[in-house]
Amino acid sequence: MRTFTNRVAVITGAGSGIGRGLAIELAAAGARLALVDINAEALAETQRLAGTGSVHVVDVSDRAAMMALPDAVLAEHNEVHVLINNAGLTIEGAFRELTLDDWDTVIGVNLWGVVHGTKAFLPHLEVADAAWIVNISSVFGFVGIPTQVPYCASKFAVRGFSKALREELRGTHIGISVVHPGGVNTNIVNAKTYDAEANAASKRFFAKHALDPQKAAKVIVNGVRRGKHRILVGREAPLMDRLMRLLPDRGNAFLVNSTIKALGLRDTQTRRLREFHEDVAARRKQR
């Protein structure tokens, strides 16, 4: 996708973070925008900042709403060239703490949102003269991190979905990029959490070290412009990717330990482990 001039780009999760950054970047590149988010006020602010775009208040996990979305977009723009499946969230907590409803929430947005968006818009991308799909995964799409099991599961799945669909579409006019951002300072740090102490540490770290969403958006737009199928965002992303390729098992453990150290969560990790053993011991006595 060498040019975005007069191309119609649909962006989910456009109300904040990377989605808002992408809207601003693509508007500056001459694209026509269809902005999608569950938050109407946030969408209106993105529209104001981008200076253009139709707004569509939709929950990407809602299948019926997403399948109806193309009609609303086509009514405004008549065509679609670029689909960016960006909407995402996390719920922070150990697997044993998380409910199945928590899983439904994370998988519903992060994975089903991508599937819904692609299924809904692919027929319209097929009849465009050129088209591109951008799926936002994460560095947690190739690294498994404690307290982020559903998030990692969804982002690994987005990576696999993108790779498989790319092979199906090989030789067509439709390209696919899967994006793996590292730490980007978005609203994801305000996620529901089962550990306030760890969440506070994450917020402090992200505020100090994470990449600005606008800079992340520039990297993504430039990557799509160059036709890159894998786009790594942030200084840590290429390093993590390389280490996981070289050392799939030991590399993951090393990156987890490095993350815990960087966030200052050694004591929290020790506490969690102690509480686990105490809970198990107490339950064994009750048997």
Image (spheres, rainbow, N blue to C red):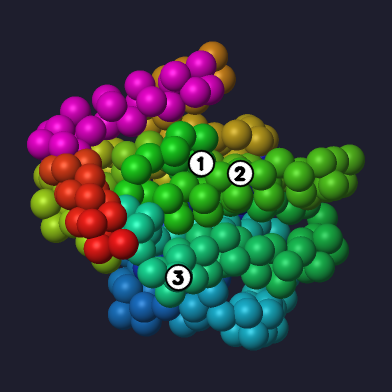
Kind of residue at badge 1: Gly
Q: Residue drawn 38% across and 69% down?
A: 99
- Location of residue 64 by image quarter: bottom right
The residue carrying mark 2 is 159
Kind of residue at badge 3: Leu
The residue carrying mark 3 is 100
Q: Return the disc, 2 or 1, that comes first in the chain's sequence.
A: 1
In the rendered structure, which segment of residues is drawn in magenta?
A: 247-270
The residue carrying mark 1 is 141
- The quarter of the image holding the N terminus is top right
Residue 234 located left or right of residue 281: right
Residue 107 coordinates in the image, percent (x, y): 51, 64
Q: Is residue 15 above or below residue 214?
A: below
- The quarter of the image holding the C terminus is bottom left
Q: Is residue 267 magenta?
A: yes
Real-space Cα separation, disc 2 to disc 3, in angstroms: 23 Å
Q: Is residue 78 magenta?
A: no
